[in-house]
Amino acid sequence: MGFDADELATLVDGRWAHVRDRVREELAGIDLPPGDHLDTEDHRALTLEQLHQLAKSGIPALGFPPAYGGSGDTGGSVVSLEMLPGNLSLMVKAGVQWGLFGGAVVALGTERHHERYLRDIMNLELPGCFAMTETGHGSDVQHLRTTATYDPESQEFVVHTPHEAARKEYIGNAARDGRMAVVFAQLITRGESHGVHALVVPIRDESGNTLPGVTITDCGRKAGLNGVDNGRITFDHVRVPREALLNRYGDVAPDGTYSSPIASKGKRFFTMLGTLIRGRVSVAGTAGSATKLALEIALRYGDARRQFGRPGTDEEVVVLDYLVHQRKLLPALAKTFALHFAQEQLVSSLHDVPPGDERAQRELESRAAGLKAVATWHATSTIQTCREACGGAGYLAENQLAQLKADTDVFTTFEGDNTVLLQLVAKGLLTGYKDQFDDLGTLGMAKFLADQFVGSVIEKTATRSLVQRIIDGSGKDDVLDRGWQLTMFDDRERHVLDGLGRRLRKANRDNAFEVFNQAQDHVLRAARVHVDRQVLEAFVAAVERCRDRETAQLLGKLCDLYVLSTIEEDRGWFLEHERITPRRSKAITEAVNELCRQIRPHAVDLVAAFRMPRQWLTAPIATGAEAARQEAQRAHDRAHG
Amino acid sequence: MGFDADELATLVDGRWAHVRDRVREELAGIDLPPGDHLDTEDHRALTLEQLHQLAKSGIPALGFPPAYGGSGDTGGSVVSLEMLPGNLSLMVKAGVQWGLFGGAVVALGTERHHERYLRDIMNLELPGCFAMTETGHGSDVQHLRTTATYDPESQEFVVHTPHEAARKEYIGNAARDGRMAVVFAQLITRGESHGVHALVVPIRDESGNTLPGVTITDCGRKAGLNGVDNGRITFDHVRVPREALLNRYGDVAPDGTYSSPIASKGKRFFTMLGTLIRGRVSVAGTAGSATKLALEIALRYGDARRQFGRPGTDEEVVVLDYLVHQRKLLPALAKTFALHFAQEQLVSSLHDVPPGDERAQRELESRAAGLKAVATWHATSTIQTCREACGGAGYLAENQLAQLKADTDVFTTFEGDNTVLLQLVAKGLLTGYKDQFDDLGTLGMAKFLADQFVGSVIEKTATRSLVQRIIDGSGKDDVLDRGWQLTMFDDRERHVLDGLGRRLRKANRDNAFEVFNQAQDHVLRAARVHVDRQVLEAFVAAVERCRDRETAQLLGKLCDLYVLSTIEEDRGWFLEHERITPRRSKAITEAVNELCRQIRPHAVDLVAAFRMPRQWLTAPIATGAEAARQEAQRAHDRAHG
């Protein structure tokens, strides 16, 4: 099975191939080495300097409105940020500055803010923060405690932190560089609270001194991402002008009258939040890139390293020829491809979502939440596995896996805690994406879900028609038949969701929390199997797009491996619900082993198809040193018998 | 359900309670803060200084022979090292100096070495290294390439590194402090190789200068444990006197004649290795302590932190009241208790193994290998889960979880790669611990296993008689019945092992590698289910030892949770092999949820029973800060409506 590496690389680069190529070219010309060996202050200084270099490259402008010198290419901006897995402090600091801070000004502000700030944000003249999370409220942002109280006398807002639990927490760019923050606070005017809104609040002057009423402390060392200066911000009755309110979805007139194009407080809040999902999509994408880089290192090492003699020969066995080594890395590689294609679809949806189409927007948010959770958990477990698969070498900083693990570790809990995100996904499924804006809190939700749910409906997309054709055209009851595979995933989703609906219908006003809480594991499962199905469909669609026959065959095998290793992992469910027989379950394990054997010779070429910018691959174990050592040893052994 | 905290603490402290208490007392008087915030050189300097403080405490002397001022308390020495989870660089450096380096001189040397070196090793006058692993050979230490060639002319050994793959790698104490190394090398005399032996080789002079012919490079930064100075050592025809050979199991006469009390080269090698398992046992124990500390932090935070309102009240829900939060932490807590009691049994076996009883020694080695693998993987996954369960706070260095994760990460691959260790366990099961010393290489093994295996036999131990009584006395087919639970674990082990025996019997001279490799996942499973059964039996025995009725009940529930969450995780197998019905499988999931609910109110008290020395619990989220913040917020909310 030879395959066409160029065909695969093109397929993988996808719709934003031009952006990926541009970033690869730019990065060939700028050296942006990670500074993780430096002490905290030097690391932060280096990261800021690199951020300036990135600003000059023009890449960050991709996502900003053309009126201010940007390209208005939302998808491209997400894809470009993904290309920095070798320096994740830089990626995250870029994400804070241009994605979160800049993105909030674009999405929540109006022309007066754009005109005044966007150019400086893009060129990094104005480094800023995105101050949403509080010490006491991370997941439940609807109940933040910071207040912004309007004072009609002075026509100012008073921004205030009422107690320690309300201080802004883990805020990137806060400890050292930020001069302004988009602050999320409960807006109060005329004695009435209108829910969370965002305001731009200066926090440091031009010389970097903290402004009066603002107290900033340093979050100090973290597991990773130490080039990013996270801090805590406390406001003591800080006054900002009325115009500081980012007023696209809610405004206060000089006399203190509140107005908003969206009547419902809940709906308004979730609409504002919804404009900010680009950050979440970026995290999913970056988790993917980090995973690819880790797999490339582990696969290259596994393909060069030998250990233990092979009976009947003088040779030692190449580590990647062992079944258990393949088992560690190849299903993870298959899932990485699956998630890559799902991410491509997600970025396209983000780019194309029709303004004003609320259902499409809700589906997009759900898809982003689900993929972010699944992709970041996949990154965490895969990078961990890669570290272990490289033994002691994987523990050394020079081989990059330690830093990849440490830097990506927070991805599972920032930009939305994964467990909470999956509950959001389940909520969307149960309400059919109707615009219900109740307490996010998982928890108030049981009672109204009970009324909403009418049975699971799989959404209608272009991919879905393809999938339906494959299912309809298949009559084969074979684990390698694509129709059978798709049916398994469909059927599991439907069954899990229907069962969940039945459980939650038992809720009433008095037992809502208990009913929901007792089903919480079921809720998470519903979301997970839903995401699994979406991811598989994206993979199937990509295989169909592949024109070269042998390349499509190989990709098809990877897709088989994704499906069957996913079923194998969850075979408890499939057996419990008699979707597969015990005999078939064992056959699936055998098929996974066989697919590993078949894919193994292509493993390194497959991971290379992602064409990570070469400056990120510095690990000596991945760049030939191990192969050279093995060769020298074999030459020596031959010479000395 | 009230329980007696003192009773539980006493039970948990077990046979070496006096050692644990002594260490707790000593640590109350010495401040040994971790230096992970320092740069590498300062961190190393601090760790060395702390090692001197530890030496002065007398704790390290526990494990050394009384003739040289030690206590000869093998078990106590392992238990004492476990008590340093808050400063794992110090623990590992102590383990290198006294466990590995000192331990090798004790076990492999003879009186001349003991007399000359032990006092200086104990009091740290002579810091040393354990130079076994090579760049090219980590797991397959039988095939190390360093040579020690005897020169009868000068009556010296010439220690030599023939090529880069043979340099000593990841050697603790090498980069900075070590003055001597126990070097493992192929012993060659009169042109004949006698396999791997150990020699003491000076590597630095008194002023710390590297000696002629010795080249040491620094492994540099690592994911964690940066207080330990790991390095690479290369020898260029370094000469040491004949007496440098640690000659307990093999000696060379002045004229070059080789002699050994053990005729077989393979058996001699594994006998030498076998004397060194204390290090492996220590790693398992330390993995356990680190897991306990991480769980204590996450449980205390989960018990204080609130998030999302509870419908119908003004209160927010305590995070640990959510089922999925319990699901993350409580089965892990149950397994931590199970492993704790299994570790206690292992340490006892190590302490008591009758000299010369080869079968007991083999069983001990197998038990150590299996428990080390399972305990260190449990640490890796549990600390990861704790990190995520604490959200952003878990990512901050101040909350300790980041460092615990980074420091323990290498445990899964050092002192024996877990995957290789489990294959050793399987080998022991298949050969009935007969003293077969063939190529460790997993791989040569298929052909002779085929002949050896006669069906699985569960070893006869004191615990086993208890277990058999429980099984025999039970007729109940109930998931909470201890007899049913034990039968499930027994039966699974027997079935997996018998099936494996049948597969491997197909091997012959030509297909040995392929047959073994295709069954490699089955081999690992056999080892894992065997360890699961041993661990369960240790837990059951501990519950039986508990005198207080309510304490025993609570511990019994934890044991149920360990059993049922283990079965749930592996329910694919139990269903595939029709050991449980689909209906029962679902009932087990329900039972796990119910046990989580019942154990939740006691979670913090349970983890506190391990009484980790208080200086290790510094995380602000675990020491009341969060509770204070929550209280302040609630007071503020009440005051301001």
Image (cartoon, coloured by chain):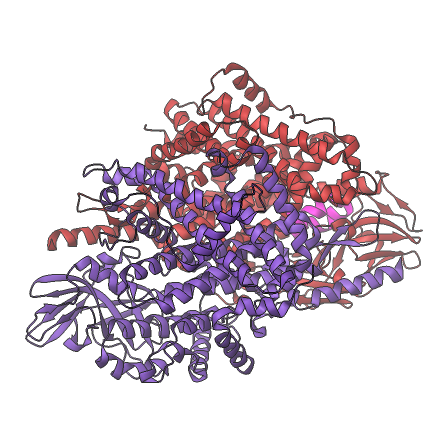
Chain colours: A red, B purple
Q: Name the one closer to the observer, A615 or A358.
A: A358
**B537 in relation to A21, above or below:** below
Write down the quadrant of residue B100 in the picture: bottom left
Q: Name the one closer to the observer, B505 or B39.
A: B505
Q: Name the one closer to the observer, A344 or B528.
A: B528
Residue A14 in percent (x, y) is at 50, 32
Is A117 part of what is drawn in magenta? yes
Query: From this viewpoint, which residue is outermost toward the front?
Result: B473
Count the marks. Answer: 0
Is A501 part of what is drawn in magenta? no
Residue A287 visible within the image: no
**B29 in relation to A59, above or below:** below
Decide if residue A285 is on the left or right side of residue B101. right
Q: Quadrant of the C terminus of chain B?
A: bottom right
Write down the quadrant of residue A230 in the picture: bottom right
Residue A528 in percent (x, y) is at 60, 37
The secondary structure that dominates the magenta segment is helix
Decide if residue A347 is on the left or right side of residue B1. left
Residue B251 visible within the image: yes
Magenta segment: A97-122
Residue A85 in percent (x, y) is at 49, 49
Q: Quadrant of the N terminus of chain B?
A: bottom right
The residue shown at (39%, 43%) is B494
The residue shown at (59%, 39%) is A371
**A412 in relation to B340, above or below:** above
Residue B303 in percent (x, y) is at 69, 59
**B22 in relation to B139, above or below:** below
Decide if residue A384 is on the left or right side of residue A219. left
